[in-house]
Amino acid sequence: MKHYLLFYEVADDYTTRRTAFRRAHLAAAWAAAERGEMVLAGALAGPADGAVLLFKGDSPEVAEKFARADPYVVNGVVKSWRVREWTTVVGEGCAGPVRPETIAE
């Protein structure tokens, strides 16, 4: 299992425009979380100029599929999005733990 970050670049009037689609967006996000695909998600703050959503899966398709169907994307609240694989090595649930004692000096 790998981790993937979905980055959203949002419209300038994001906080206003999202209102009409927020219930549907959150329903999709919670459904993805309940399926075990989405780990965490939320808007960036101060300013609210983007969002980051963390997924886990065998390929980036899980995040890409979510983005393509997300009401925020479909309705132009999100201007663009991209998915990046994230190599997680420390912390609960990381995909590939690396302990300091395993590193050669």
Image (tube, helix red, strand yellow):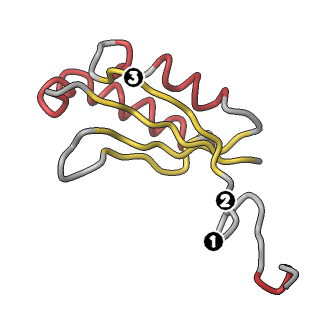
The numbered mark at residue 91 is: 1
Nearer to us: label 1 or label 2: 2
Residue at horizontal 63 percent and vertical 71 percent from the top: 91
Relative to the observer, which residue lies in front, 21 or 81? 81
Q: Are marks 1 and 2 in contact (CB under 8 Å)?
A: yes
Whole-number angstrom distance, CA of label 1 to CA of label 2? 8 Å
**With respect to residue 22, does 68 lie above or below?**
above
Residue at horizontal 65 percent and vertical 47 percent from the top: 3
The numbered mark at residue 1 is: none
| Image quadrant in which you'd find residue 75 | top left
The numbered mark at residue 80 is: 3
**With respect to residue 59, does 68 lie above or below?**
above
User: Judging from the image, what secondary structure is the residue with disc 3 in?
Assistant: strand
The numbered mark at residue 88 is: 2
Q: Amino acid at mark 3?
A: Ser
Residue 24 horizontal/vertical position (percent) = 34, 25
User: Judging from the image, what secondary structure is the residue with disc 1 in?
Assistant: loop
Q: Are marks 1 and 3 in contact (CB under 8 Å)?
A: no
Residue 14 horizontal/vertical position (percent) = 19, 29
Please state if 75 lies on the left or on the right of 68 as rendered: left
Q: Residue furthest front?
A: 105
Please state if 100 lies on the left or on the right of 81 as rendered: right
User: If you read the primary sequence from the N terminus, does the residue marked by circle 1 or circle 3 appear first?
Assistant: 3
Whole-number angstrom distance, CA of label 3 to CA of label 2? 25 Å
Residue at horizontal 77 percent and vertical 48 percent from the top: 1
Q: Amino acid at mark 2?
A: Thr
Whole-number angstrom distance, CA of label 1 to CA of label 3? 30 Å
Relative to the observer, which residue lies in front, 5 or 103? 103
